[in-house]
Image (cartoon, helix red, strand yellow):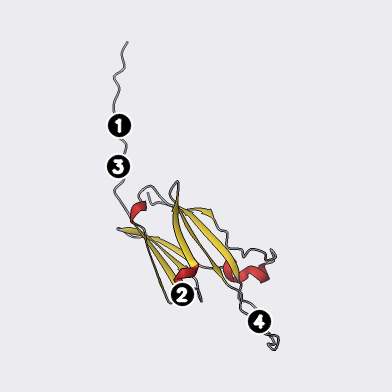
Amino acid sequence: MALIPQLLGDILTPFGASSSNQETSNYVNARVDWKETSEAHVFKVDLPGLKKEEVKVEVEEGGVLAISGERAAEKEDKNDKWHRVERSCGKFLRKFLLPENAKLEEVKANMEYGVLTVTIPKQEVKKPEVRTIEITG
């Protein structure tokens, strides 16, 4: 039976923003792909315009992968005239509960061209030993 990824939280709403979808749509709809290969779990996160220094990848107690960061607001000039503002700014956080076969001590992260790739190798999970108990009587 295939493992079904379990999503713990999907919190990508910028802090201080209204809950309206129009104002938070960029990060609320940020795309994360999670695929499982024969060797690893691979997460790909679209983070356009962010540098690796602005993103944090952590493995929390209980096997939870946390990806967070912040996009700074663009500096405004009094002479600027904005015609449209669609890109969000602020803090974001995504959390995923990792399966038992994830090697949490070997997590690697790489960021290129605004795409964060987190690779978590897999390990063989020992199946519990079944012992037959003799019934007396």
Q: Residues within 10 Å of mark 3 (few under 14, many from 20)?
A: few
Q: Residue at x 50, y 73 (%)?
A: 50
Q: Nearer the viewer, mark 1 or mark 4?
A: 4
Q: Residue at x 63, y 77 (%)?
A: 86
Question: Which residue does the numbered mark 4 point to in the structure image?
Answer: 76
Q: Residue furthest top?
A: 137
Question: Which residue does the numbered mark 2 point to in the structure image?
Answer: 114
For marks 3 and 1, give the CA distance. Answer: 12 Å
Q: Name the element at disc 2.
A: loop
Question: Which residue does the numbered mark 1 point to in the structure image?
Answer: 130
Name which residue type carries label 1: Val
Camera sees residue 103? no
For marks 3 and 4, give the CA distance. Answer: 57 Å
Q: Name the element at disc 3.
A: loop
Location of residue 111 by image quarter: bottom left
User: Where is residue 126 shown, x and y percent of the image?
Assistant: 30, 42
Q: Earlier in the sequence, mark 2 or mark 3?
A: 2
Q: Quick check: 128 above or below 72?
A: above
Q: Earlier in the sequence, mark 2 or mark 1?
A: 2
